[in-house]
Every structure is written in C-alpha cells, then in structure tokens.
Amino acid sequence: MNNHKRLIFWFFIGMTLVTIIAGCSSGPQKTSKPSSDWSRGVAVGENAAGAVSLVVDPDGGRLRLVWPVETEEGIKFRYLQMDANATPLLQRDLEIASGQLRTSRLIAAGDGYLHLFWAQRREGEKYWELWYTRLDSQGMLASEARRISAEGENVGSFALAGDSLGGVVGVL
C-alpha cells in the first residue's frame, strides 16, 4: 500500500510539472487576422477642431467632407473631395465664417451641389446661430453664407435631412 501512495504522489508531481512547463511555453501568440477586404483608416487632415461631416455620391464615386480646422487665422472649414479609393482629389479652406464654429452638416442638393449648415458664435456674441451656404461640385461657394436662425435665438443643436428633390428639412 505504501508503494501505491508513493506512485500516486509522484504521478501528481509529474502532472503538475507538465502543466507548469506547458503553460510557460514560448510559442507565438495567435491573433485573429483581419479579412483582406477590411477597411483601413486613411489620414486626410490634421488640426481638426470638431466633427467631420461627409456626403457620398449616389454612385459611390466621390466622398466630400467638411470639418472645422484650427489655422493661424482662427477656425475655418476645410473641404476635401476624395475618390472611391480615398485618394484626395481636391482640398481647400472655405472662407465663409469667423468666430467659433461647430456642428458642420453636409447634405446633397442634387447636380453635384451641397447644402452646408453649421453653428457659429461670432466674436462678442452670446448665442450660437445656425448658418447656411451652398457649395458647388468643386467646393466653391455657390451662394452667400447667411444666418437662418432667428435673431437672438440660441441654437444648441439641430437635426437635418435631405429630401428626394435636393431640399432640406430641419428641426432646431
């Protein structure tokens, strides 16, 4: 019986050593490999001072983006147009606003035009205002920027949606 206990003792010691050695192996760690068609991020700008708004053409051929950027002259909107492979085609700063800018929203207007809305607080003003302009297919101003919120109305947030005719429906 004493031999039997000794055999069980050495068996458990051996199993413990095998478990420890197997657990400390130096084999490569396995990681999941992403699919070959997995989308990758592409750096398209720097100094972003707010969220990016984008519109994808119905055929997927172009992406058009607008976001506020910090420049030496203050905050401006940057316009970027990319092809379907995220290759930049056109980039420019839009000279349409001054003061504090936020919440840019792009909406397709048809025929390559875009509606651009944003919240702005001009220097020395207390309230945020909602502003609007239209951009052509090259990101150039197609209309004069104008305030569309009521005088003295503070626009904390707004929601917009494009309609099938290229118009916009909004809620303040």
Image (cartoon, rainbow, N blue to C red):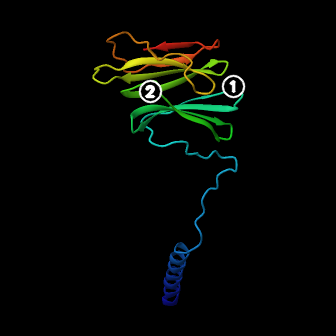
Residue at left offset 52%, top offset 22%: 116
**Is the residue marked by circle 1 packed among few (<14), some (14-19), or many (20+) residues within 10 Å?**
few
The disc at residue 17 is none
* Residue carrying label 2: 103
Q: Nearer the viewer, residue 52 or 134?
A: 134
* Residue carrying label 1: 58
Tag 1: residue type? Answer: Pro
Q: Position of residue 67 (x, y in %)?
A: 49, 32
- For this orientation, the residue located farthest to the right is 59
Rounded to the nearest angstrom, the CA distance separating label 1 from label 2 is 23 Å
Residue at left offset 33%, top offset 16%: 154
Q: Secondary structure at mark 1?
A: loop
Classify residue 71 as left or right of residue 28: left
Q: Secondary structure at mark 2?
A: strand
Q: Position of residue 103 (x, y in %)?
A: 44, 27
Residue at left offset 55%, top offset 78%: 18
Instruction: Identify the image quadrant of residue 112.
Output: top right
Location of residue 59 with respect to 110 vertically, above or below: below
**Is the residue marked by circle 2 packed among few (<14), some (14-19), or many (20+) residues within 10 Å?**
some
Location of residue 99 with respect to 40 vertically, above or below: above
**Chain-order first, disc 1 or disc 2:** 1
